[in-house]
Amino acid sequence: MASRAREFFIGVGDTAMNVARQVGGIVILFYEVVRALLPPRLDLRELMRNMLKMGYMSLPIIALTAFFTGGLMVIQSGIYVKQFNASALVGWGSGYAVFREIGPILIGLMFSGRVGANNTAELGTMTVTEQIDGLRALAIEPIRYLIAPRVVAMMLSLLCLTIIGDLIALGGGLLFSKLILNIEYSTFYYSLVDNLTPADFIQGLVKSVVFGTSIALTSCYFGITVRGGAVGVGRAVNAAVVSAAVSIMLLDFAVTYLLG
Amino acid sequence: MIEVQDVHKGFGHTPLLRGVNLSIPAGARYGIMGPAASGKSVLLKLFCGLLPVDAGTISIDGQTVTGLSESELMPIRNRIGMLFQNYALFDFMTVADNVAFPLRRRGQLDEDEIAARVSERLRRVGLAGSEDKFPSELSGGMKKRVGIARASIAKPDLVIYDEPSAGLDPVTTSKIYDLLLADQAETGGTVIAVSSDIEALEGFCQTIAMLYQGTIICEGDAGSIRDADNPIVRQFVRGDLKGPL
């Protein structure tokens, strides 16, 4: 009994130390990235290459998700809209939820699954095949050459994808409101523009920047700290996706609390 | 001149290098041999600060390499070319871009000059016409030769080759060592090669050292290594099945 309790506490302690090590590593990486970006000396070729791969290539899956998310909200709220005859509130409700929460979170999670996981796998493979050491041996700082452009690219890509995704989600909401609830386009539109403020939109954008930075840092951190060959790369991808999802939820709470 | 003094290095609780001492004169062709997992590749990485030492010092031309930060190591690494055991080619770049990379980062040559240097280097390693291929399209031996071309293209003061002939056929091995000899004659730089191919090392290196269980157990020219009294060295060089190894 005593040995079981001891094992339990050892396990808890190990996990706590591991989490503390990872959080500390990510914070240090953030500091190094900021230092690499000051003064701005970004490798523009690498930045553009990453934005194309991470942002532009993610557009179809993000658009598809956003469109049906907008529709889904209309379906879910349909019963109550009919019950309370609240069709004038559908546009506002959809816009409020999309701009402030659903857009940044869902698009962030999709982005993490597609781009973050890929980034970890790519950097992890570069680490285990000594390509990162190869850069260092050629007197190139991996943080400045590889990591900083990826962090900036992921941050900007998620911001752009969130703006586009928000608009597509509203388009989906607009269309399904008409098809399912028979709400006129103009009713939806005026409900949206009369009740929402720029703050609703901006809060979502702040979240997308914070989430993008978080996804980038976690995916890069787990990529460059891979140990143990192909198995290690698999473990790192798993850890990066889980950590990014957890950090999105925690940061969402923090930003919502701070910005109101 | 490279001075290695009482260098220790381990991973976790496993010691790998247990007090390595070496003195490599400038302009020398120096070989390091030893059984698998004896720490040869780790020792090479310590030379350019890719790994930190646990104890001891390494200096290159009087400048201590150990204990420096990454930014302090950059000027030293600019003078070093390195071939990694696993090639370390950048898989998102073509062969030509990989080889051109050290020149482009230095920014001293225009693109025409870089292209000419790259073509010449690839021709010398027998890879003319492979400029536009990606590393994933190459065999292990071809990757090795691209790595050699990249390590030597900027004519560094010190070139470190980790297993330069591994995976190559005998004819290509001879060509590669001829190229390394010609390069060294041209630049007068120091070359350190790690290999288990004793015959190739004998033909190329002026001095060979054997690393065993974390220390240098024998050092000398090819002849003295062949005739060494140490039974471990003798067995390793002759490839005997019976012996202390």
Image (tube, helix red, strand yellow):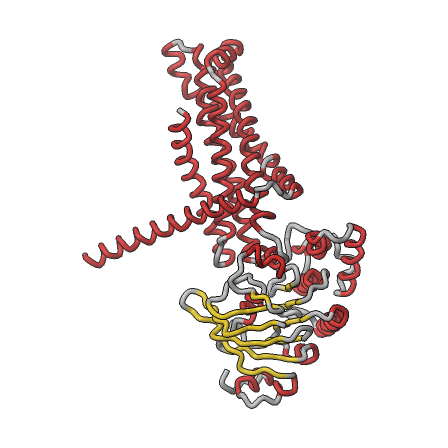
- Residue B172 visible in the displayed image: no
At a point 64% along the width and 64% down the height, the residue shown is B83
Q: Nearer the viewer, residue A206 or A4?
A: A206
At a point 50% along the width and 26% down the height, the residue shown is A68
How many badges with numbers are in the image? 0
Q: Is residue B116 left or right of residue B145?
A: right
- Residue B226 visible in the displayed image: yes
Name the quadrant of the C terminus of chain A.
top left
Depicted A113 relative to depicted B76: above or below: above
Residue A33 rendering spot, x and y as whole percentages: 53, 44
Depicted A158 relative to depicted A194: above or below: below
Asked where in the image residue A56 lies, by quadrant, the reply is top right
Q: Is residue A21 left or right of residue B85?
A: left
Residue B180 rendering spot, x and y as whole percentages: 72, 70
Residue A185 rendering spot, x and y as whole percentages: 53, 11
Depicted B38 relative to depicted A42: above or below: below
At a point 48% along the width and 71% down the height, the residue shown is B8
Q: Nearer the viewer, residue A256 or A6?
A: A256
Residue A74 rendering spot, x and y as whole percentages: 45, 19
> Please, which residue is most extreme toward the left here?
A1
Name the quadrant of the N terminus of chain A.
bottom left
Q: Nearer the viewer, residue B39 or A54?
A: B39
At a point 48% along the width and 75% down the height, the residue shown is B19
Depicted B230 relative to depicted A28: above or below: below
